[in-house]
Amino acid sequence: MKIVRTTAQLQKAKKELSGSIGFVPTMGALHHGHLSLIRQAKEENDHLIVSIFVNPTQFLEGEDLDAYPRREEADIRICELAGANILFMPTIDQMYEKDELCIGAPAIRGYILEGQKRPGHFDGMLQVVMKLLNLSGATRAYFGKKDAQQLALITQMTKNYFMDVQIVACEIVRDEKGLALSSRNVYLSESEKERALCLSRSLKRATKMVMSGELDSDTIMKEMRSVLQEADEVEYIAIVDRAFKALKKVELGNTIILVAAQVGKPRLIDNIWI
Ligand code: AMP
């Protein structure tokens, strides 16, 4: 595995690869959620590139940029064991210059839910993903459904900008109790981890209701709120279609149910695709 830290090195290393390239961009502190993307990318392509970059432009003022978990040595080992050909770990200077041209998230899909809570977050995310996709020369790039809105926006960006890359949506990986894995879960104490299970529990309850024929969004969201009482603060519950338009009634095969809540220090997000 080649570890490259400059964009020039990446472009040189990439030229030596012939065949398809699977690419997995991450912010590091790798867990089994990342690993499932990495494994899928490895399986479906001739070559695998992973990037680790804690992207400053997607963090808002006062968010956890400096405290974001960093575990470089362990991450390198994981990527090596997973069979990555290239691990790209750039510095901020490599990725950005002053007064850049920026991409903006679209008003509707980009500034609701996560985008409303974290205005500007998706602009920064799209900016770095555009750079990383161009640099990697990926045939296919892998993203988790865990960040459903991010996934929808990246898919839209590649379509709107005619980018020659296939975006692959990967299933959410959970721990044995149902908690969606996240690098930020390290902030949770044991008791907070227990309370954090109310997010996945609320989604399971919603799924059960749908299975038994209840399709009314308000009724489902009301029930979810009652399951979410163990959270310190519920930021949003939403039932949307795959294009993130709010749904009055669940549409089977076209619905995402999302929840965001604060438990202890971190804000947690989770969702289910129905
Ligand atoms: P991050 O390092 O948080 O930026 O995540 C990098 C990629 O891993 C994103 O595409 C995430 O959606 C994905 N990811 C993070 N957690 C999970 C999970 N529990 N299951 C599946 N994918 C995940």
Image: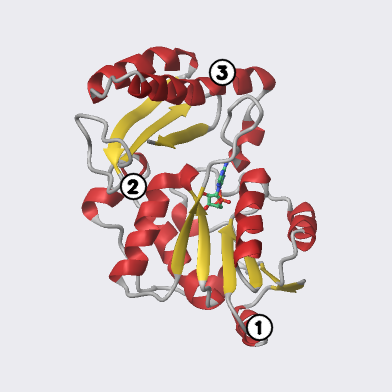
Q: Quadrant of the N terminus?
A: bottom right
128 displayed left or right of 72: left
Query: Considering only order in the chain, which callout, 3 or 2, is on the residue closer to the N terminus?
Result: 2
**Which of 40 and 121 lies nearest the eye of the viewer?**
40
Front disc: 2 or 3: 3
Question: What is the spatial separation of the Cα atoms under label 2 and label 1, in whole angstroms?
Answer: 38 Å
- Checking the image for residue 195, the label placed there is 3
In the image, what residue type sits under mark 2? Answer: Pro
Q: Which of the 4 image quadrants contains residue 103? A: bottom left
- Place residue 228 in its image quadrant: top left
State if disc 1 and disc 2 touch (CB < 8 Å): no
Mark in the foreground, 2 or 1: 1
**Residue 146: x, y in percent?**
49, 43
In the image, is residue 273 above or below residue 7? above
Is disc 1 in contact with disc 3, using a CB cutoff of under 8 Å?
A: no
As shown in the figure, which amino acid type bears the numbered disc 1?
Leu
> Label 3 sits on what residue type?
Arg
State yes or no: discs 2 and 3 in contact (Cβ < 8 Å): no
Nearest the viewer among 271 and 122 is 271
Left or right: residue 251 compared with residue 32: left
Is residue 207 left or right of 51 when viewed as pictured? left
Q: CA distance from mark 1 to mark 3?
A: 46 Å
User: In the rendered image, is residue 52 in sight?
Assistant: no
Where is 144 relative to 11, above or below?
A: above
Residue 32 or residue 52, whichever sits in front: 32
Instruction: Find residue 17 and name its label.
Output: 1
Residue displayed at 45% across by 67% down: 166
Image side of residue 247 versus residue 117, left or right: left
Label 1: how many residues lie within 10 Å, few (<14), some (14-19) or many (20+)?
some
Q: Looking at this view, is 93 or 225 the one in front?
A: 225
Q: Which residue is denoted by mark 2 in the rendering?
A: 119
